[in-house]
Amino acid sequence: MRSSDRVYVALRDEILDGTLAPGVPLGEIEQSERLGVSRTPLREALARLQADGLVVARGGKGLIVAGITADDVREIFELREALEVKSARLAALRRDPAVFAALRTDIVAAGERLDSEGSRGDFYREIARMDAAIDEAAGSPRLAAALDAVRAHAARIRRLSSADDARLASATQEHLMIVDAILEGSETMAAYATELHLHRSLAHALSTIDAAGATMPVPASVPNPSGHR
Amino acid sequence: MRSSDRVYVALRDEILDGTLAPGVPLGEIEQSERLGVSRTPLREALARLQADGLVVARGGKGLIVAGITADDVREIFELREALEVKSARLAALRRDPAVFAALRTDIVAAGERLDSEGSRGDFYREIARMDAAIDEAAGSPRLAAALDAVRAHAARIRRLSSADDARLASATQEHLMIVDAILEGSETMAAYATELHLHRSLAHALSTIDAAGATMPVPASVPNPSGHR
DNA sequence: CTCCGCAAGTTTGTATACAGAAACGTCGTT
DNA sequence: AACGACGTTTCTGTATACAAACTTGCGGAG
């Protein structure tokens, strides 16, 4: 395995789980020393992260971990909706019913375990499996790749908004609606169920983020990117 | 301007206009010498092209210009539809009527000039302006960036299918429908008009490509044993 | 006291050198 | 003559060295 891949995964994970907070400058020398590789593979990893939108260039002067503004949340959900709805539609057309029947059972089970301790990891894993199954059924690696990138941003946003048990229970029902629509082979219902779920997810995210006081701030140490004074 | 940017643009253009045909191997040394840069910026450019899907890795052995199979055409149009429809919807919601009124006039004019010689360049430029105006109105740089990448693939496909005057005249009408829907502010009509246009574009592309004998072949020397990318 | 300018230091961008791995050709053996 | 193994060669991946550009801090002038 190439070390640039390892570095990419390592940095991506750290950005997604918040270890590398928004606004943190990513100096090439500093990071390459920290991760134990030279600048060349590190630069490659940073380029990929920049393409993913997880890292942004501070005009002319270095790279920083991307912040998340309210506008970013809106954009990400708009883009995600376009892709998830399309994926769900295609999955409804091309799915293998057996796969989604099994998936449905697992999601119900994960939903029922939700009150017990430490079950959220299982729940999120089950949702991830469902996403993977939909992508697989949709039969478009390109679409899946685009969704993978945008879901990374969604995961960051979810990390900001605190999920309560009520929201998770509701999310379970919403996911079941999607699975059922795909199971039925109804393109239209799959689209509606997906839109519904994303609409509610966005509403929840916005409300809990606002409740927390503010969206993740733009890098505090970056007073003015445009040079106005 | 960074030389890696120049190299990226140069290679991208050559791939899009067919100078670099599908299946052509892109040796780092050979290309870096041809373009007059060292391997470092060239590698960066290749990495970006690979992320765009215009260049693919031949398992373990170098990079080649991506081919276009029938499945690729389907995938690209599915992805493009998802993004273009969303963009058109958002544009209908957020547009500046004055911009699209002016655009409508220009498209009509370009359409009427279509019979004259050498007017296709103007026509395609007008369409590109319209795409840019929609992206601008949609107000989502992320969506616009995703569309830019997928439109590059669409341009490659269009290069394969020969556009006749009848198709261009029809395309003009289809674009006018989209502009009118956005001008009206009707999200639903903008979505329908966009889907209609893409559906017809795909049908035309598939028919003319099939008529030409075959889709652009996958590099004949690439069995690609494992499905891994 | 403030503002402009210069210089030092740091950082990115590029080039090149080195090492490991894979493919191809050739030679030897059966 | 065919197959296998080994050596050569060329490639990618990584590291490091070099240069240019930008930032930053200090000093002097107004």
Image (spheres, coloured by chain):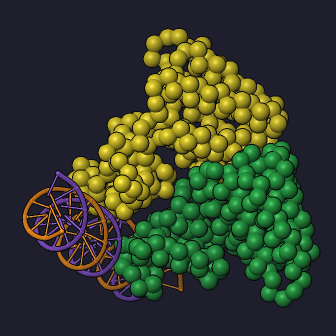
Chain colours: A yellow, B green, C purple, D orange
Indicate the position of residue A191 as horizontal and vertical percent values: 76, 36
The answer, for residue B102, to whether it is visible in the render is yes
Which residue is more in the foreground, A79 or B212?
A: A79
Asked whether D2 or B106 is in front, the reply is B106
Name the residue furthest top: A115
The residue drawn where x is 56% and y is 29% is A206
Vertically, is A131 above or below B1? above
Q: Position of residue B221 (x, y in %)?
A: 60, 74
Q: Tell me, yes or no, if residue A1 can be seen here.
A: no
The quarter of the picture where the C terminus of chain A appears is bottom left
Q: D5 or B47: which is nearer to us?
A: B47
At 39% from the left and 56% from the top, the residue drawn is A228
Q: Residue at x 58, y 63 (%)?
A: B53
Q: Residue at the spot x=54%, y=57% of the render?
A: B229
- Count numbered badges in the picture: 0
Q: Where B138 sits versus A96, above or below?
A: below
Residue B89: image location, x then y, percent: 76, 47
Report the side of A223 relative to A74 (left or right): left
Camera-nearest residue between B207 and C7: C7
x, y percentage for residue A202? 61, 31
Question: Residue A126 occupies which quadrant of the picture?
Answer: top right
Q: Quadrant of residue A2?
A: bottom left
> In the rendered view of the protein, which quadrant contains the N terminus of chain A?
bottom left
In-image side of A148 versus A192 (left or right): left
Q: Is residue B157 left or right of residue A43?
A: right
